[in-house]
Amino acid sequence: MSENRGNFTLDAAQAYLANEPEMQVESLSERLHTVTDGQCRTIFVAGDSGVIAFDTFGTPGRARAYRRAIEATLPGKAITTIIYSHDHLDHAGFAADLAPDAEIVADELCAKVIKARGAEGQLQPTRVLTGERNDISIDGVDLVLLNPGPTHGSGNIAAHFADERALFSSDTILANAKYGFMPDYHFANFVPYMRGFLDLEWERFVPGRYELTDRAGFERGCDFIEAVMTACQQAFANFVPIWMYEPMKGFVGGNLGEQFGDLEGFDGHIGQMSIRVVHHYLMGGWGLEDTPEPSVLLADEVAL
Amino acid sequence: MTDNHDGCGEHCGIFTIPGEIPILGAYRDICYVPLRGNIWTASEGIYRTCFVEGEKGVVAFDTFGTPGTARAYGGAIQRVFPDKPVHTIVYSHDHLDHTGYPEELSADADIIAHDLCQQVVVGRGSDGQKAANEVWDGERRDFNIDGCRFELIYPGHTHGDGNVAAYFPEEKVLFMVDTVIPGVGYTTLMDWHLTHYVPVMKRFLSLDWDTFVPGHFWVMNREQFIACLDYFERMFEFGQKAIIDGIDPHDWDGLNKYTNEKLGPLYGREFRFGEYAAMNLSRYMQDFLSGGWGIEGNLLPDTSPL
């Protein structure tokens, strides 16, 4: 039997899609748990009768491994709801393999992108949210879902758990410097939107990748991105050849090493981050997502 | 000048750092050559564009990417046509490095842009990038401005927003920015809409032209245009294979080792391979890991002939 393919077209991808890695679960409270495959990370919540799972992980095999991890943590409870953090396949691509009959909740723009994409295994949301804040109750769990505006991907929503004093936001701030080329980030308002989460009461931050951090680690992550954006402007302003990896790594890494060089992955990633961020200033941002009053071009082309 | 930072002394695009930004005002030499008919092409060594001689003035495509370079571009045009002002500027697309500084090129010129470009230009409100005063939408529009005859074509989503080609059928010249460029792609293919890119660009092969003017580096012929698209088409396969082979798209050393080993024998002599093949691969890998980006990156492309 072949696996759901997402966007893959090569038959040789089947083994990659089928691989089921070991999942590591950490309980943040009696009802709230976080799980990782070593790279991506998400959360799930025990409801009165079932489980609310955020995201699916990025292959059919990982989705199945996620399901087993949930079953082992919360035996006897089925996944009745999936909440997509955003549209990307590596986080929300395989609901068909995690829980095909679950209700799926997502932001409207996320739902539109998923419909346009039509990736195999990425099921269409059944409940669509709009606006910056949605307070909803699902299976006895009160959820606060927040979409401050374009940050990463499309329709990216964070979840605030007041009782646990926890915040989950996928592929935005990390506890380290392993941002790579920062794919599909929207920089124009990214840091202000992220800092807006600091208006809420929480102590623990669950990112969409790697390890957890606390409020101070989150604030430092915002400081780091902001510092990279400033250093990239300074590089551009002072004739650093912004299209070259090594000079950009040298300038930005040299400027920020003393303050942020202790972040895991700094040396391996600061050059990649710099190449991406400096082009924000060269080109002016990408699309209407990167404007002072952001919206989305062609959003009306997709009807839900 | 902008009021969002002090002391810049030039139009500052979207810079937010205070104080002087030396690169913005720096003069750059512009090289310019006649291409065919009344079409000229100009470059400062990396960026390239076109300008067209009319009966009374000049139609200039784009502005280059800093105030200083825009002034130098205007100066170059005036050196060729000292009695003919730039009365029209055509924006190829929305990005500031190509269309950010019309005032320094020709402050009173009319500006033409596609609607999708205009929406972003207006929304961005970048210091120095003026909104167009003639906006068109749809796929094709003929223009005859002061004796300059060309067609603007929006073939679909390729790179940036509202990115249009200029087609000169009588001269058999096609000009389009940041799509087909000599050698491998630029860095991580910034703001490219990969789902659309190759099939949309292939639509231009239904038109009669033999000379292609890209937005960077040197002028190409039809065969070189096709070879470039072949490279990008094959990258869809390499992007998948790299994931299957366990490559991390953010492992810079691993990406370079992989591209040198797998792509080097095929494309190692291509212009900028050593600089950008690994970044190209990382971007294509993301297209399979995350899916295309946003609405533009996921709509089905129109592949019909133009």
Image (cartoon, coloured by chain):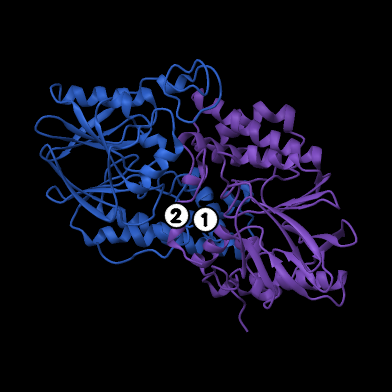
Chain colours: A purple, B blue
User: Which residue appears at 36% of the width and 54% of the height?
Assistant: B228
In whole angstroms, how far apart are the C-alphas of marks 1 and 2? 8 Å
> Picture coordinates of residue B244 (x, y %)?
61, 65
Amino acid at the residue labelled 2: His
> Picture coordinates of residue A34 (x, y %)?
81, 59
Report whether mark 1 lies on the same chain as mark 2.
Answer: yes
The residue furthest bottom is A1
Q: Nearer the viewer, residue B129 or A221?
A: B129
Task: Determine if residue B49 is in view.
Answer: yes
Residue A208, image quadrant: bottom right
User: Which residue appears at 36% of the width and 20% of the height?
Assistant: B27
User: Which residue appears at 53% of the width and 53% of the height?
Assistant: B283
**Tag 2 residue:** B193
**Tag shown at residue B293:** 1
Tell me which label, 1 or 2, sits earlier in the chain.
Answer: 2
Residue B72, image quadrant: top left
Decide: is B140 above or below B34: below
Secondary structure at badge 2 equals loop
Q: Residues within 10 Å of mark 2 (few under 14, many from 20)?
A: many
Task: Determine if residue A38 is in view.
Answer: no
Amino acid at the residue labelled 1: Trp
**Marks 1 and 2 close (CB-CB < 8 Å):** yes
> Picture coordinates of residue B234 (x, y %)?
44, 62
Which of the chains bears the disc numbered 1? Answer: B
